[in-house]
Amino acid sequence: MLRSDAWSATLPGGASISLVTGVSARDDCAVYSLPGMDLVVGTDFVRGVGFSMYENGQMSYRDLGYYLVVANISDVAAMGSLPTGVLVVIRYPQDFANTAFEEVMRGADDAARHHGTRIVGGDTGTADDLYLSGTAMGVSEPGTALLRSGARPGDHLFISGDTGIAEAARQYFKQVAAGGARLVDDVEQALGESWRRPRAEVELGLALARSGVVTSCQDTSDGLKATIEQIAEASAVGFDVEADNVPVSPLVEQVSAVTGRTVEDLTFGGSVDFRLVFTVDGGAMTAPDAEERFPGATRLGTAADHDAVRLVRSDGSASPLPGRPWRHS
């Protein structure tokens, strides 16, 4: 059992600060209540050269720096917060070239600026390999940060776009490295870009938080299956995901055809696409109105009062969500 997160302090001038959401909530970020705003803080670690996409020649040092920052900003975006800065930690072996270090930092700076914020600090030092870690900070209007725990039976479940592309890319380039069949150049380019230049959905996160009808939110950095299951657990609800509603990328279909991995496994499994999965209050807004309010979002299904998370097919049959979720290993 995790201990209570209860904590507060008062500054000498009388201003108070309190921890609203801490580690026991197992959310994307911690949330502090400050005078006039909430402070959102999250951290993420990237394995550096341990990435199979790097090892297969699909990512440069600059790409690794870019990815690191997006992974951290995406957590802030999922809380519906405005990113205000990113701290980066880069640990590297003694023989790591200065030019390589500079490329990592350029990529990190590129990503921060692309998402409207800056690298504001961090730490560097030596290690036995290249290790990258970051901490993103953001701010929200008081009490508006989006958590995983607010979904209720009858809420509509949405996703901001198709998923599975990053996992499809990982599986595809693993096969290519082993001498397997290849797809055309523009498809390979699009697959590689899902890792080289991912995007955190900051503007959508802010819109969700402002709407007043979104009850929970999380990014898909652990894959679609894990994301839905984590929202279900935190909110103590089940979900009926309608198979016919799940948006499938043509890239995923093409990779499925040449790798033998099923479309469903690629779509639901451990794909780090940084989409937003969110629930909308079913009593406050219809699904069509929500789709109009949040362009590009697709209704996946409905939160239910049972404890299962299941894929419901057009013939009425139901099964657990397919795919293997990311397990941080």
Image (cartoon, helix red, strand yellow):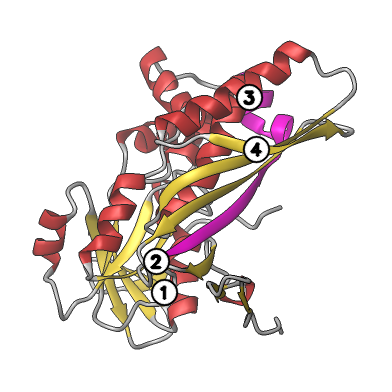
Q: Nearer the viewer, residue 88 or 49?
A: 88
Disc number placed over residue 121 in the picture, else none: 4
Q: 326 and 63: which one is in front?
A: 63
Residue 205 drawn at (x, y percent) = 33, 54
Q: Are marks 4 and 3 in contact (CB under 8 Å)?
A: no
Residue beneath disc 2: 36
Q: Residues within 10 Å of mark 4 (few under 14, many from 20)?
A: few
Which residue, given by chain and number where applicable, does mark 1 sit on? Answer: 309
Q: Which span of residues is magenta-colored?
A: 37-60
Q: Amino acid at mark 3?
A: Met
Front tag of 1 and 2: 2
Distance CA(mark 1)–CA(mark 3) = 41 Å
Position of residue 226 measured from the top left corner of the image (x, y, whole percent): 50, 62
Q: Amino acid at mark 1?
A: Val
Secondary element at tag 4: strand
Q: The N terminus lies in which quarter of the figure?
A: bottom right
Q: Do we see residue 59 in this rendering?
A: no
From the viewer's perspective, is the residue at label 1 or at label 3 nearer?
3
Residue 327 in the image: x percent, y percent?
A: 64, 58
What SS does tag 2 mark? loop
Q: Nearer the viewer, mark 2 or mark 3?
A: 2
Mark 2 vs mark 3, CA separation in Å? 33 Å
Q: With 329 as the anchor, is 82 left or right in this view?
A: left
3D distance between C-alphas at marks 4 and 3: 11 Å
Query: In the rendering, which numbered label is found on residue 105?
Result: 3
Please tell me which of labels 1 and 2 falls first in the chain. Answer: 2
Judging depth in this view, the residue of 37 and 102 nearest the camera is 37
Check whether the beta carbons of the residues at disc 1 and disc 2 lie within 8 A of each other: no
